[in-house]
Amino acid sequence: EVANGGHRDLPFLLSFKAYNPSNVTALETWVGPDPCSGSWLGVRCSRGRVAGVFLDDASLVGSVAPLLGLTQIRVLAVRRNSLSGPLPPLDNSTSPRLRHLLVSHNNLSGGLNLSLPSLVTLRAEQNGFHGGLLALRLSMVKRFNVSSNELVGEIPSSLSGFPSSSFGSNVDLCGKPLPRCMHAYNAVEDGASNATTGVAQSPTAATNTASGSPSSSSNGRFSQLGLTALVATGIGNAVLIAISLAISVAMFIYMRRKLRPSKDDSKSSAALCFEEEDKIRSGEDKCQKSGALVCFDGGEELRLESLLKASAEVLGKGVSGSTYKAVLEDGIVAAVKRLSALQFPGRSKAFDRHMRLVGRLRHRHVVSLRGYCNSNGERLLVYDYLPNGSLQSLLQGNGGGGRTRSLDWATKKGILFGAAQGLNYIHTFPARPALVHGNVKPSNILLDERGAACVSECGLMRYAASIQQSAPQPPELFLDRATAAVSSRGGWRGYAAPELTASGARATQESDVYSCGMVLLAVVTAKGAADGGEEEGEGEETMGMVKIGVLCTAEAPEERPRMAQVLTMMSEFM
Ligand SMILES: Nc1ncnc2c1ncn2[C@@H]1O[C@H](COP(=O)(O)OP(=O)(O)OP(=O)(O)O)[C@@H](O)[C@H]1O
């Protein structure tokens, strides 16, 4: 961590500090040559490098850019400050490890030019960002909010699965989930914003233009409404800043007392995630003894105490435990599975090893495990919360999240192909022994913000005391074409492979393929939106898919295809 006689991260931190007046309480502690000494408030380190800066509500001013020069940073949380200036363009070369960028409620401006495929959280609301969203490349982002900025143009389809509250109160954003773009035009390039062409106007702006309103500027960029909103936001911000400054001062006096590190004061729990990760890597296993939350990539901001304090809503109970939707501080939402003590008694090193392996799985079609806790008989697994329900709820006719989603043929294929890709990723993940899911069924196939299917709960059942594989489901799921295939092969067995009924039998990749085949048959033959009128080519494709399902559900495990082959066969219909 030391280069040319100094800590490598020191210049960036000091340059950030230099923007601020000397009386900013948090930064008063930023003295000495080693930011990882433990005495720098808000700085978290991993392996001797700065991995997180947590300075929410710290009365900060100046540019945030120096902090984004920290090449090993994973979490930057500087919400509710008075930072200004633009965010520098970020990509994998500048910020390879950045997972959470939380800069909301500041005075930041300029364009959003972020190409970070591994970013999990972007909270940029309540700033002055302008330009379009087309320079955002965030393929893995799970938490996203750019509301209350000055953004314009069309919302890219990659982000259209987020709710309208993620985009609201901007100058001129349009397209799903906001109202449709009415009129395409070429935005005038804004040097600071990197705005791109091909953006469009909202219905409001289009009306102004059509009526020849004097407020409609020649390039159509800002509607009068937008300008009024800007002025109002400016005044509002000034009042808010004054109030928040007063509150921040009071809070910081309190926080300093509470958080100032001392020799006997164990470090703030926010630090746990980084520390625990270091211990895991170095082979120590102290996390069990300390009862801490073990955090994985993208879960760095999780804290056990906020998890325990979170408001929780039961999502459902299965044989392995109960799953809750937990709303943490700052509105972060997670799905927390509390494993049944009956089914998962005692501590098991093998279970811990497995969880750490599962914590490394990162794929568009696999639900990410962000952390877990295994202490004092309590086992909590923290997953990304997927708001659109499960395949099970779709098959039962409700779309999850209070929404209805039609099961047309394209949707069915998309879900099956996505789930198959997720399962193939699990099967081919470099691990010894190779990973097995062990409980592929519709309630373990969830739908993310964008409606993509994601496989959940990899390998959990293997560690359960006495759970029989998936309980049988109502046979009416299997209709018409597949009924014959299923019943002629020995009757209904739910989603589990026949060989698993033998006592002591263990799930294998072959039994996963069987379950995948059963899911495929269930989906293909489920009643859908297109019933009563098939789409072109659907009949042929349906038969093709049924054939794949029948191959996967071969009685003898060795006759079943590998997941990679299933994918190749399916891709013919995609
Ligand atoms: N990450 C998640 N995001 C949103 N909903 C979830 C998540 N994980 C599980 N759920 C939902 O919570 C409910 C309960 O899930 P849980 O996994 O506890 O039980 P199950 O899948 O029905 O049974 P099992 O114990 O066999 O896994 C299901 O409806 C599931 O769709």
Image (cartoon, rainbow, N blue to C red):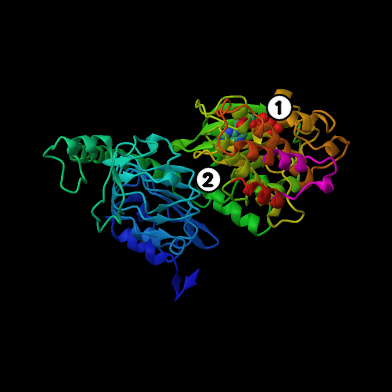
459 lies above or below 7:
above
The answer to whether residue 255 shows anywhere in this view is yes
From the image, tell me which residue sits under label 2. 269
Crowding at label 2, few (<14), some or many (≥20) Cα neighbours within 10 Å?
Answer: some
**Which of the 4 quarters of the picture holds residue 181?**
top left
Where residue 60 appears, as percent x and y from the top left, is: 31, 50
Which residue position holds label 1? Answer: 480
Q: Closer to the camera: disc 2 or disc 1?
A: 1
Q: Secondary structure at mark 2?
A: helix
First along the sequence among labels 2 and 1? 2
- Please give the name of the residue rendered at 36% of the width and 36% of the height, measured from the top-left corner: 178
Q: Amino acid at mark 2?
A: Ser
User: Disc 1 on helix, strand or loop?
Assistant: helix
Residue 484 location (% of width, % of height): 78, 29
Residue that lies at the very extreme toward the bottom in this rendered image: 4
Q: Residues within 10 Å of mark 1 (few under 14, many from 20)?
A: few
Magenta stretch, residue numbers: 545-563
- Above/below status of 390 relative to 573: above
For residue 407, side relative to residue 151 (left or right): right
The span from disc 2 to disc 1 (Cα, nearest Å) is 56 Å
Residue sitting nearer the eye, 180 or 334: 180
Residue 526 in the image: x percent, y percent?
Answer: 64, 29
Vertically, is 213 above or below 352?
A: above
User: Callout 1, which amino acid?
Assistant: Asp
Magenta stretch: helix, strand or loop mostly: helix
Q: Which mark is residue 86?
A: none
- CB of mark 2 within 8 Å of CB of mark 1? no
Figure quadrant, ligand 1: top right
Between residues 430 and 85, which one lies in front from this camera angle?
430
Q: Quadrant of residue 518?
A: top right
